[in-house]
Amino acid sequence: MSDLQVLNVAASGWRWLLLRWGRWRALLAITVFSVTASLLLTAALFTALGLVDHLGLALLIAALVPAIVAPLAAHAVVTLAFELERARAALHALATRDSLTQAFNRRYLLERLELEVARAMRTGQPMAVLMIDADEFKSINDRFGHATGDRVLQRLAEVCGQTLRPYDVLARLGGEEFAVLLPETALSQACEVAGRVLTAVSQLQLDSVAGEPLTVSVSVGVGVLASSDRGGAALLERADAARVADERDDRVGHPVAALAVQRPRSLDSLELDLDGVDAVTDQAPVELHLRLAGAAHGGGATPAAGARALLSTRLVAKTQRR
């Protein structure tokens, strides 16, 4: 683990400052401080005792001794501090990260979700959640083996993480299911993020452990925070319901990726602007299905540059009145 990674989880105060400086600058700063303090104390003491005639020799000794001793002692202290913080960072990673994909784990997600929901409710900012599920993942494990399945999950986490903002939270809930917290994100913006995820996954090229090419597709559900929500559980359920609704839908042409968006009942209207597509609903709940057809199944190449435009042209709106 690098010093920068240690710094990311280091505590505030002097430890943060120590890691911020780095080993050698910290050693230099401690040495300079020791020498300066020694000189000032020696000068003050000899002046107070009236030993001004011997002050020059005393100052020389006061400078040489800490200049030799301080770096040695500081090196031991600084090294120990860095090792402690590295161990602390490793424990933090074990407690919050999924060991396979290095995404955050379910426990961290649920804790962070409640904090973000409370903050969104307090500030009135929007918030959204993505639920991402690898389609037919069991068949990949059965056909290519669990080693290939692990590789698929690692690559999915990697490409999804690359599409997110620094403050978004990607977590593996378990199995082939991931979730993404999107703070300060409205529905239209969440759809854009989901579109980037779909595009990235559609362009993903994978081989099995034996070298056989394989295709991976995902279903993505988007849920937005409603004023009637009392916690993060409702938001997760809403996003998961959208994902499940998409998985139940009949698929045409072996889509590489699919996105389902389900509106919470408390919203009066939905405005979606994605690549020029506007959909405004009335009081009824709505599900929006975006399909990205790809060439991984042998149906002709889909240009990467046209992927987002293809998302727009495949928009289907379903309104269900209750």
Image (cartoon, rainbow, N blue to C red):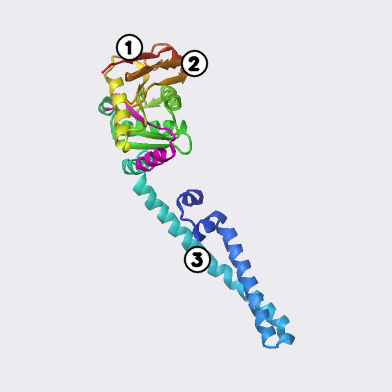
Kind of residue indicated by mark 3: Val
Q: Can you tell which mark lies on residue 6?
A: none
Lower sequence index among marks 2 and 3? 3
- Mark number displayed over residue 77: 3
Badge 3 element: helix
Q: Name the image quarter holding the C terminus.
A: top left
- The magenta-colored residue range is 113-137
Tell me the quarter of the picture where residue 192 sits.
Answer: top left
Say what secondary structure mark 2 lies in.
loop
Q: Is residue 293 above or below residue 101?
A: above
The residue mark sitting in front, 3 or 1, is 1
Residue at screen point 54% across, 57% down: 17
Picture coordinates of residue 263, whole percent (x, y) = 35, 24
Residue at figure coordinates x 73%, y 85% from the top left: 52
Question: Does the image show residue 25?
Answer: yes
C-alpha gap between disc 1 and disc 2? 24 Å
Residue 154 is inside the magenta segment: no
Corner quadrant of residue 221: top left
Find the distance from the CA under tag 3 to the CA under tag 1. Answer: 65 Å
| Residue on which the image places disc 1 | 252
Please tell me whether mark 1 sits on a helix, a strand or a loop: loop
Left or right of residue 16: residue 236: left
Q: Is residue 204 visible?
A: no
Residue 252 at x, y percent in the picture: 32, 11
Q: Is residue 79 left or right of residue 266?
A: right
Quarter occupied by residue 74: bottom right
Which residue carries the number 2 mark?
Answer: 276
Looking at marks 1 and 2 on the same chain, the residue that comes earlier in the sequence is marked by 1
Q: Position of residue 299 (x, y in %)?
A: 39, 11
Amino acid bearing label 1: Val
Q: Earlier in the sequence, mark 3 or mark 1?
A: 3
